[in-house]
Image (cartoon, rainbow, N blue to C red):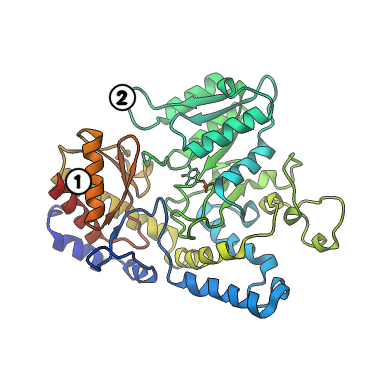
Amino acid sequence: MKTASDRTVAEKLDAADPLAPLRAEFHLPLGPDGSPRVYFCGHSLGLAPKRAAAIVTEELEAWAREGVAGHFTGPRPWVAYHEQLTQGFAELAGAQPIEVVAMNSLTVNLHLLLAGFYRPTRARHKILIEARAFPSDRYAVASQIRHHGFDPAEGLVEIAPRAGEDVLRTEDICEHIERHGAEIAVVLLPGVQYLSGQLLDMQAITACAHRQGCLVGFDLAHAIGNVPLNLHDWDVDFAAWCGYKYLNGGPGAIGGCFVHERHAHADLPRFAGWWGHDKATRFDMPQAFSPLPGAEGWQISNPPILSAAPLLASLELFEAAGMAALRRKSLDLTAYLVALLREHVYEAVSILTPDEADARGCQLSLRLNRAPHEARAIHDALTDRGMVCDWREPDVIRVAPVPLYNTFTEVWDFVAALKALL
Ligand SMILES: *Cc1c(COP(=O)(O)O)cnc(C)c1O
């Protein structure tokens, strides 16, 4: 990579990439000149797998052909449709199959999990989040605290990066937990922080929170399908994610959650519905709720088949590639992006994302060293030139080269376009 400035180097890296053929499995949005855009926005909405349309059509046809009988007939009966996502989710989450389920969407799942895991007492009623939490997570947590009769102004505690820093330090998180843990019921943090791209040390955080008797949940919106996870071994209590970012399940796709095996038979005060009830007697319509063991027992409603089908197409691609190989390519792609930025636009761009490979996923968060309105204009000009990244207030450009469908040449083209604009 010492001649990283040469585009032929990028072309050689692409030619040597064993995962390169996967790109052809996706629809690539086209730019104004009819060629594919450089799509670095998989952190927001993953691209459409080409097979998604066919797999959705199969279910539309089953509905047309079978009507209600489709619940029990055909190659993928709807009653058990979500179970087809279980193995793929378990692999991506580093979980046992009993620990994961596809259901609802992310914020809804956070609420449902908190309904069971957040059991505040006067002495221990706080929830620890990060100061720059995604707003939806903050709203969810504040409303849970209020729902239990406590005041979020006191019950919602935030951990922030040090003054002048952009990312959290594990030592600061653990020190806070050691000092205040006796008052904290739940620690709820991101796996990968959406704004900075920082990958948190979930194992270390879980261990120090458990030592203080806190339960630990992670929001994996930006982590699942991006970085390898080992939720079971890390002893995480619960986690939730959405299906439309790195998982490419399509807008509003079904999400997922994880409940550690340790809680598989726990009698937590969760919100119940018939889909969480024992499969063997669900259709006997019994009066008493008898939950399925594990994560499936947290389901409420029958799953949305049409928003689960595209995810099935995408998980097949993850399985074909393997998360370990995807991560290897991802580390190379992002390191290449860092190298080119350092070489070409060093003075003009700060990288907020940690430099250590084990503290980031594929995303880099960039801050242009100029007035926010000028930075914003440069972001917009990148869009006009066929680059798709995104702008997050107040001044961050998020750029995510995704190993399933992005190339080294695209990374090169992105930096060339940025350099020209600067
Ligand atoms: C994307 C994202 C969400 C979105 O929530 P939905 O309930 O799926 O609309 C929530 N939290 C985080 C951290 C996210 O990145």
Which residue, given by chain and number where applicable, does mark 2 sit on?
Answer: 164
Q: In this view, does 390 lie to the left or right of 185?
A: left
Ligand 1 within 8 Å of the CB at mark 1:
no
Q: Quadrant of residue 409?
A: bottom left
Q: Which one is earlier in the sequence, the residue at label 1 or at label 2?
A: 2
Query: Residue at point 25% right, 35% down?
Result: 372
Between 223 and 253, the one lying in front of the other is 253
Expressed as whole percent of the image width and height from the top left, the position of residue 321 reads 42, 65
Q: Which residue lies furthest to the bottom in this view?
A: 65
Disc 2, SS? loop
Residue type of the residue flagged with mark 2: Gly
Label 2 crowding class (10 Å Cα cut-off): few <14, some 14-19, many 20+?
Answer: few
Query: Residue at point 33% right, 58% down?
Result: 329
Ligand 1 within 8 Å of the CB at mark 2:
no
Query: Residue at point 65% right, 23% down?
Result: 150
Q: In which quarter of the image is residue 411?
A: bottom left
Between 314 and 260, the one lying in front of the other is 314
Expressed as whole percent of the image width and height from the top left, the position of residue 47 reads 40, 61
Q: In this view, does 96 lie to the left or right of 173?
A: right
Disc 1, SS? helix
Q: Quadrant of the C terminus?
A: top left
Res 274 seen here: yes
Which residue, given by chain and number where applicable, does mark 1 sit on?
Answer: 341
Between 422 and 31, the one lying in front of the other is 31
Label 1 crowding class (10 Å Cα cut-off): few <14, some 14-19, many 20+?
Answer: many
Expressed as whole percent of the image width and height from the top left, the position of residue 257 reads 59, 49
> In the image, is residue 407 above or below residue 348?
below
> In the image, is residue 212 above or below residue 318?
above
Residue type of the residue flagged with mark 1: Leu
